[in-house]
Amino acid sequence: MTGAPLRVGVLGAGTVGREVVGAFLDGDRAARLAPADGRPLRLAGVAVRDVDRARSAGLPDALLTDAPAHLVASPDVDVIVEVMGGLEPARTLLLGALSGGKAVVTANKALLATHGPELEAAARGSGAPLRFEASVGGGIPVLSPLAADLAANRVTSLRGILNGTTNAILTAMAREGTAYADALAEAQAMGYAEADPTADVEGHDAAAKLVILLRLAFGAWVDPTAIPRRPAVRDSASLGAPGITGVTAEDVAAATDHGRVLKLVASGRRREDGSLEAGVLPTAVFGATALGSTDGVQNRIEIEAEPVGSVAFAGPGAGGGATSSAVLGDLVAIARGGASTWAGLPAAVGRWDGGVSAPAGPALAAPSGACYPLAE
Ligand code: NAP
Ligand code: HSE
């Protein structure tokens, strides 16, 4: 352990934040936050909306504030961890931290997908690291390996199950015959869902995560609103309901009859002509494959690249404990002098302007009328 402590300000103490804060307050776990070859990490403050509620939940009064901007501006804070969610005030706070030279760790995929170019420019401008491993795949280490360990590869395509809430819902519907609304309520109770679960079930959350993966894989920030999230509909020129909101019990049963399971699959591919194909669509996957047997809150990301071939990353995709693992890992990386998650990749501070087309191919015509793409 070398040097003065690195003082950490945490914005948000909800499902993820309270696990991050808990790691600092628990002796055994706190010992892991002092890397042998880096600076020890110390908790300097925690910002929440409702200080009384946080105090009642056992957070030390002396650390609490309801003024996140003060924590960001404080000369006694070196690193900001953002686990509050939402676009504002998170965007303004993180731009302030980065432009002031403070390192930032965030789990906020919606913010990164929406304001990635601006945040990347701010981090590159000041040289402050911006790390966001927790923003995709919860506790799965995938972004740092993609940006660093696979840096010598040319990624050709990627796909995956990127949302734990919808995967838990589809699994419960297929395995236990649970009703959609009950399965969603269970995912919310487990702390998997976003504050507004529309983000999960309509596919916005998976689309945001896909944008982050595409940034690291293909070097461009795609507009998350350009990612197709609605399946085609039989005998209709219009598209179906977004994400998994149109998936019925009959659709799930029809997929089972074909040896398949319905999964919300995010995919992206750079075509030979340089154009981009991407989507977040309910997909009929063979149940016997690794993707098809990825169940419950588990996520899986598969990457095709040259020269490595196929690589996959799997594990818990949501939940406070699992996600805190990725946040704390980023903090330790910063304590060891680590750079931003994009590591040595070329800058991508502008938006992709080449258009995005939906994946095309054979589909399962389901009883609801939706046509779900087929996948191995
Ligand atoms: P959450 O349970 O809703 O917690 C949010 C926390 O932020 C609460 O402590 C809240 O304070 C605080 N907060 C919100 N707005 C604030 C403001 N304006 N000022 C001060 N404090 C504010 O959310 P979460 O599930 O932990 O998720 C946090 C972030 O991590 C989100 O970006 C989410 O997408 C991401 N993430 C979540 C998971 C997961 O499994 N849950 C996994 C990966 C990434 P009050 O309680 O006082 O309102
Ligand atoms: N709501 C998200 C999910 C949290 O269910 O996957 C993890 O990013």
Image (cartoon, rainbow, N blue to C red):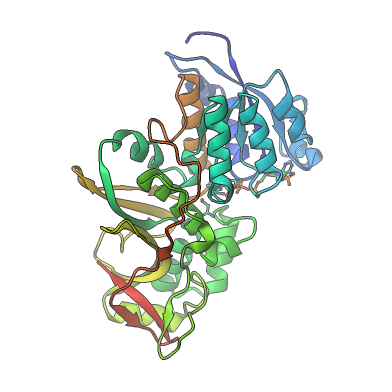
Closer to us: 194 or 130: 130
Q: In terms of image quadrants, where is residue 153?
A: top left
Residue 345 screen position, x and y as percent: 38, 35
**Farthest right residue?**
52
Q: Is residue 179 left or right of residue 18?
A: left
Q: Is residue 32 above or below residue 96?
A: above
Q: Quadrant of the C terminus?
A: bottom left
**Farthest top residue?**
3
Q: Is residue 160 left or right of residue 249?
A: left
Q: Is residue 60 visible?
A: no
Residue 247 screen position, x and y as percent: 47, 77
Q: Is residue 35 above or below residue 117?
A: above
Residue 356 screen position, x and y as percent: 42, 63
Q: Is residue 53 left or right of residue 370?
A: right
Closer to us: 124 or 278: 124
What is the tally of numbered marks visible in this picture?
A: 0
Q: Is residue 346 visible?
A: yes
Residue 278 screen position, x and y as percent: 39, 62
- Residue sitting at x 42%, y 79%: 232
Q: In terms of image quadrants, where is residue 74?
A: top right
- Residue sitting at x 46%, y 56%: 353
Closer to us: 360 or 245: 360
